[in-house]
Amino acid sequence: MPSLEDMKRMANVEAEPLLARLKDDPNNSDLLIQVGNIYKSTHQFKEAVDFYNKALQVHPENVAIRTEMASCLYYIGDVDGAINELQGSLQYDPKDANSLFNLGMIKWQGKKDSKGALAAWRELLKANPQLSADRKATVQKLMSEVERKGSS
C-alpha cells in the first residue's frame, strides 16, 4: 500500500503533462477537471479543490464538479464549505441525486444534523422516482438508521 507521500508523487508525475498544457490554456476546464481528478484519486484533496475551483470559475454550472469539490472539502475538514458547494449545486439542479445524497451524508456525519440529513434524503427520493432499486434501498436504510439513532 503506497503512503500518502508516494501517492502525491505519483499524482504529480501523472498531472505533469496536463499542467504543461494548462500553461498555454489556463482556462481549459476539461484539463482542470482532469488534474483535479488525479489529485482526488490520490487523496490530495486540497490540490483537487484548487483545480476544481478553477474549473468552476470557467463553468460555475457544472454540478458534477461542484459535488466532487464538496467531497474533497469534506475530506479536508471543511464541512461548511462542502455544504455550501452542495447547496450551490442544487441552485443549478435542485433534483441532482448525487448532491442531495451527499448533502444528507455530510449533514448527518459532519454536522450531526439528523433532521437536515433526513430532509435532504426525502427530497432525493421525492425528486428522483427513477432511482435504481439498490440506490433507493441504500437511502431508505440510511434514513432508518438516522431515525433509529435519533430516538435512542
Image: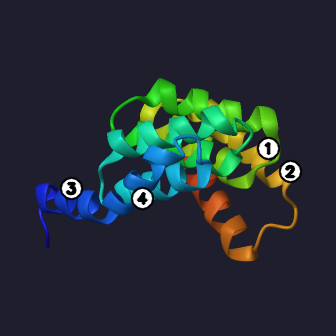
Gap in angstroms between the C-alphas marked 2 and 4? 41 Å
- Please name the residue shown 69% across and 35% down the image: 60
Q: Nearer the viewer, mark 2 or mark 4?
A: 4
Residue 127: x percent and y percent? 86, 50
Q: Tag 3, which secondary structure?
A: helix
Q: Tag 4, which secondary structure?
A: helix
In the displayed structure, 145 sits above or below 150; it is below
Quadrant containing the N terminus is bottom left
- Please name the residue shown 66% across and 40% down the image: 118
Looking at the rendered structure, the kind of residue marked 1 is Glu
- Please name the residue shown 82% across and 47% down the image: 95
Q: Which residue corresponds to mark 1?
A: 123
Q: Which residue corresponds to mark 4?
A: 18
Gap in angstroms between the C-alphas marked 3 and 2? 41 Å
- Please name the residue shown 79% across and 44% down the image: 123
Looking at the rendered structure, the kind of residue marked 3 is Lys
Gap in angstroms between the C-alphas marked 3 and 1? 38 Å
Can residue 76 be spotted in the picture?
yes
Gap in angstroms between the C-alphas marked 4 and 3? 16 Å
Q: Tag 1, which secondary structure?
A: helix
Image disc number at residue 8: 3
In contact (CB < 8 Å): disc 4 and disc 3: no
Other residues around mark 1 within 10 Å, as few (<14) / some (14–19) / many (≥20): some
Gap in angstroms between the C-alphas marked 1 and 2? 5 Å
Residue 72: x percent and y percent? 43, 44
Residue 36: x percent and y percent? 44, 51
N-term-proximal mark, 3 vs 1 = 3
Q: Which residue corresponds to mark 2?
A: 126
Other residues around mark 4 within 10 Å, as few (<14) / some (14–19) / many (≥20): some
